[in-house]
Image (cartoon, rainbow, N blue to C red):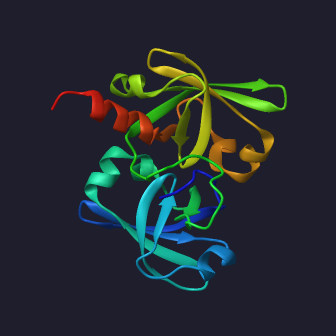
Amino acid sequence: MFTGIIESIGKVQRIENLGEDSRLVITAEPAVIASLKSGDSIAINGVCLTVTTFDKETFITDASAETLSVTSLGHLENGSHVNLERAMLLSDRMHGHIVSGHVDATGTVIERVADGRSVRFSIEIPSSLQRYVCKKGSVCIDGVSLTVNEKDHNRFSINVIPHTLEKTIIIDYHEGTVVNIEVDMIARYLESLYTPA
């Protein structure tokens, strides 16, 4: 489980294609590397993956064909920057919202507009997800816990403050950027409870 509060930005050092799967070699800050153990969960752009090995500067994780097909990880290149968050501790404060790291689909940035000191982004998502997104509700974009400002069918907008822009890869978003979307877990469970089997 994660909170959607990004700890640091990593960098893809190398991508190894292993048939339909890929192995990602990620450079991370010493503070992140120092606490890792083999088998740990780590969210990369909101995708929960398993740390297999690591050294003083990098860690390695594998992405299956399924993961590559439903997330934006297949778009990564050598040198790409990625949002990183280690799995939450039960003793931590819950700063964002409950994030599973199981991406529902990808969305596309369709607009970026300056809004005071913040930046407003409009994002288009698959129609199948629109019922899970509501005004002032939570949504996870590339692993970042954010609040929905407005919603219009399968499009919604978010405002990103300067701190979040500086500490995440959102600062590089532009029209056409493909992003990972995880809808609010509570909305999914409520639908499951009230939908006849």
Q: Where 180 sits versus 45, above or below? A: above
Q: Where 183 sits versus 80, above or below? A: above
Q: Tell me if 114 is positioned left or right of 98 in this view.
A: right
How many dots with numbers? 0
Question: Looking at the rendering, in which quadrant would you find the C terminus?
Answer: top left
Q: Tell me if 163 is positioned left or right of 123 in this view.
A: right
Q: Where 8 sits versus 176, above or below? A: below
Q: Quadrant of residue 105?
A: top left
Q: Please tell me which residue lies in front, 190 or 83.
A: 190
Q: Residue furthest right?
A: 117
Q: Where's residue 163, x and y in %?
A: 78, 46
Q: Where 9 sits versus 46, above or below? A: below
Q: Residue furthest top?
A: 152
Q: Please tell me which residue lies in front, 23 or 132.
A: 132
Q: Quadrant of residue 173?
A: top right
Instruction: Write the residue at 66% across / 62% down.
Output: 8
Q: Please tell me which residue lies in front, 155 or 172.
A: 155
Instruction: Write the residue at 39% across / 46% down.
Output: 71
Q: Where's residue 168, x and y in %?
A: 67, 50
Q: Tell me if 67 is positioned left or right of 121 in this view.
A: left
Instruction: Write the residue at 68% across / 76% down.
Output: 31
Q: Where's residue 4, x and y in %?
A: 58, 50
Q: Where's residue 85, x and y in %?
A: 57, 61
Q: Residue furthest left?
A: 197
Q: Quadrant of residue 70?
A: top left
